[in-house]
Image (cartoon, rainbow, N blue to C red):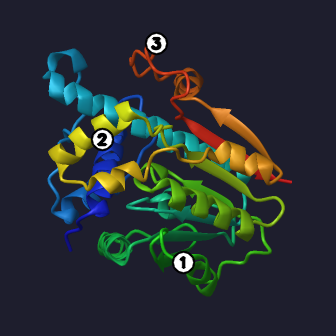
Amino acid sequence: MPVNGVGVTAVAVAAARALESDRPDALVVDPWAAALVGASGVAVPFPERWPERAEDIPEVDRSMLLGASYIGLRTRFIDDELRTGRLRQAAILGSGLDTRAWRLDWPDGTRVFELDSPEVVEFLTGTMDAVGATPTADRRVVAADVTAPWASAIVRSGFRPAEPTHWVLEGLLPYLSAHDQAALVDDIIDLSAPGSRAVIERAPALTDTAETRERLQTFALATGIPFDDLLARTDPPDPAAVLAAAGWTVAEISVPDLERGYGRPLGVDRTDSPADQRGGFVTALRG
């Protein structure tokens, strides 16, 4: 069952995990990523095998290797956060083709909620069933859009607001308007019992200025994405600030922090990046 729309991005992320898994120094090994890409019917630009010498491949493929390297770093960091938390309720919002319900060694009795569009979650479930994969947790699928009222849907699926939850927002916020990002974080706060944790990949801080509008207009013409949709993503809330204001203990982790921590330099020059260009990750604990 081919996927489309946002599902195409999910396939690309799965392709990056498959490529990462082929590295001799892989940070993540996903046994099912390649099968998900193949079953999707979506053509992705990532090579299927990690080259012996990255410098010998074309420049365009080298950019794909860089992208896969970042996905490997991101995936491992979030995996490690979930392993550290050891909570028995986890919720992955905008889950895409995430395989953590199968890959990770969850504590006994853990419920893992995956929330995404009906097409994406149905494709993932069908493909994983077809390859004979068995979840290592009590996997609960929630077919819902995070930009619509989703809290009632996750509760109907067995989510228990009175129990601590580990929330995962990976690669999601940049696709949402500033308004929807704020609403999503507010909903997480409302659904979180004491002891809850969150790991969030930040959206870049795109400020609404005349220069930004000009760049967005050019991007809209090139991609066909409506200008108003792009403009709605400017001035997003900082989840670190929102969670801290709600009384959570917050830590901010930059991408260079992860590069150093995992010994995985990405080789990207950030010296000319604006000082306020948000990015990286936020971890948070509700006391």
Residue 51 place in picture, x, y as percent: 22, 27
Q: Residues within 10 Å of mark 3 (few under 14, many from 20)?
A: few
Residue 33 visible to an observer of this rendering: no
Q: Is residue 96 left or right of residue 253?
A: left
Judge by depth and name the residue closer to the eye, 117 or 245. Answer: 245
Q: In terms of image quadrants, where is residue 46?
A: top left
C-alpha distance separating marks 1 and 3: 41 Å
Q: Amino acid at mark 1?
A: Pro
Q: Amino acid at mark 3?
A: Thr
Residue 28 place in picture, x, y as percent: 45, 42
Question: On the rendered image, what quadrant is the C terminus found in?
Answer: bottom right
Judge by depth and name the residue closer to the eye, 220 or 251. Answer: 220
Q: In terms of image quadrants, where is residue 270?
A: top left
Name the residue tied to disc 3: 271
Query: Residue sitting at 21 percent across and 64 percent down?
Result: 40
Q: Is residue 23 left or right of residue 38?
A: right
Query: Residue sitting at 24 percent across and 57 percent down?
Result: 37
Name the residue tied to disc 1: 149
Which disc number belongs to residue 216? 2
Query: Residue sitting at 29 percent across and 35 percent down?
Result: 215
Q: Secondary structure at mark 3?
A: loop
Q: Are marks 2 and 1 in contact (CB under 8 Å)?
A: no
Residue 230 place in picture, x, y as percent: 35, 50
Q: Residues within 10 Å of mark 1 (few under 14, many from 20)?
A: few
Q: Secondary structure at mark 2?
A: helix
C-alpha distance separating marks 2 and 1: 29 Å
